[in-house]
Amino acid sequence: MNTPPSPLSSLGTERTDGSSVRIGALVPLTRPGWVEAGQHLLAGLELAVCDVNDAGGIVGRPLELVVRDTAADPQRAAAAVEELAHLGVAALAGEYHSVVARAAAARADALGLPFLCSSAVLDALTEQPTQWVARLAPAQSHGWRVYADFLLSMGHSRIAVAAEPSVYWASGTRILRDCLAPRGGTVIELDLRALTPTAVCDELVDNRATALLLLAGHPEPAVSIVKSVRRDQRLAEIMIGAPAGQPEFTEWATLLGDDGAAIPFLRYLPERLSPLGARVTTALREHLAEAPSFVAFEGYDTVTVLADVLRSHGADRARTAESWPRVAVEGTRGRIQFSRTPGISVWQWAWPPIQVVDRDPAEPDRFRILHTG
């Protein structure tokens, strides 16, 4: 389950002499995981580790990442948490996929291992409230409400969701329905287990939908659905949306070209980054050879928070877990503090900045901010 060392740092070799403070990093780096998201998340984590070590480490001890590839597999993630706990890491960081993060959080909670979740948004990250887990990304119920507000502001009241079976997608559908129904909106569910991309187009016409949301995996079936809808003259006026963020990454633009533009999605960035965020942007762009996604900033902020906690309270796991409510750290996207939020079982940053953006049809490499929340 080890991953190759990144060229960003020399931290790929795991120390065994006890001189370093180690953080376990859970990242999807192979299929069926969303590999590009995992690469951006890892780049942010590693850059922050380099910056921490350049500033003196953790009270003179180097900070080290011990990386494990989850490959979007909940069982593999849970096993990695077990392994990392036995290796003596001070805390866990990372993970992008919500269902995978939920499995990791449950195991971390059971083992008494602090876990700062970087990117996963599923509200019910643990079954019961826990002191061991905190999260940087906004809860799905919060972010997707912002997206529902955007849909209504654009005049869309008949919303079709093309959904695959998943706790995450089912949760998203429920949030959208709860937000839209009291305000006159209708959510039409299209089951992708039973419908081909062409059949999805027929259903959109029959149901007079004005917007289609892709609650489906990337690249497939999302890419094939977009291509089918874009080529169907009956659907020339329909809006395609992807609240989960599929169009954020360059693979989307590579696979779809112009067809991938004008598809609004959620991302968690402010309109203007802080000086720290601007510096991190430059370093990440150099490493990734492309513009960093919001996921890379989530990775950087995760290590920034953990390093602050470890400097202040040492590498004792219980003391780290007790420190979540006292965190007050300047991250790339604003000041990070955790609180208990109604309906959320983990310590939550409430809230990171939220935008609805799309790729500009006139310049698909440029993002347009359509709505903020």
Image (cartoon, grey):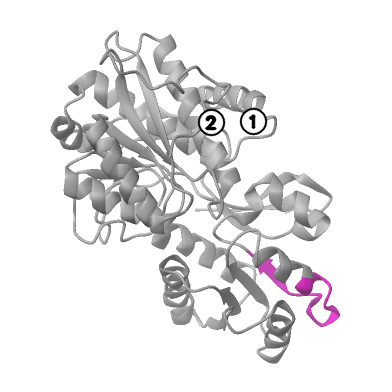
The local secondary structure at tag 1 comes to: helix
Quadrant position of residue 227: bottom right
- Foreground of the two, 266 or 200: 200
Task: Name the residue located 25 percent from the left edge and 16 percent from the top edge.
Answer: 18
- Residue 16, relative to residue 75: is it above or below? above
Element class at badge 2: helix
**Residue pictured at 39% horizontal, 47% vertical:** 351
Whether residue 140 is in magenta: the answer is no
Q: Which one is in front, 109 or 85? A: 85
Range covered by the magenta-colored residues = 228-241
Marks 2 and 1 close (CB-CB < 8 Å):
yes
Classify mark 1: residues with Cα within 10 Å, few (<14), some (14-19) or many (20+): some
Residue 270 in percent (x, y) is at: 53, 40
Q: Residue at x 73, y 68 (%)?
A: 224
- Name which residue type carries label 1: Leu
Tag 2 residue? 43
Q: Position of residue 160 (x, y in %)?
A: 60, 79
Q: Which residue is mark 1?
A: 288
Residue found farthest to the bottom: 206
Q: Is residue 44 left or right of residue 192?
A: left
Q: How many marks?
A: 2
Q: Amino acid type of disc 2?
A: Ala
| Residue drawn at x 78%, y 78% as measured from the top left | 235
Look at the image and tell me whether residue 139 can be seen. no
In the figure, residue 75 lies in which quadrant?
Answer: bottom left
Report the Cα–Cα distance between label 2 and label 1.
Answer: 8 Å
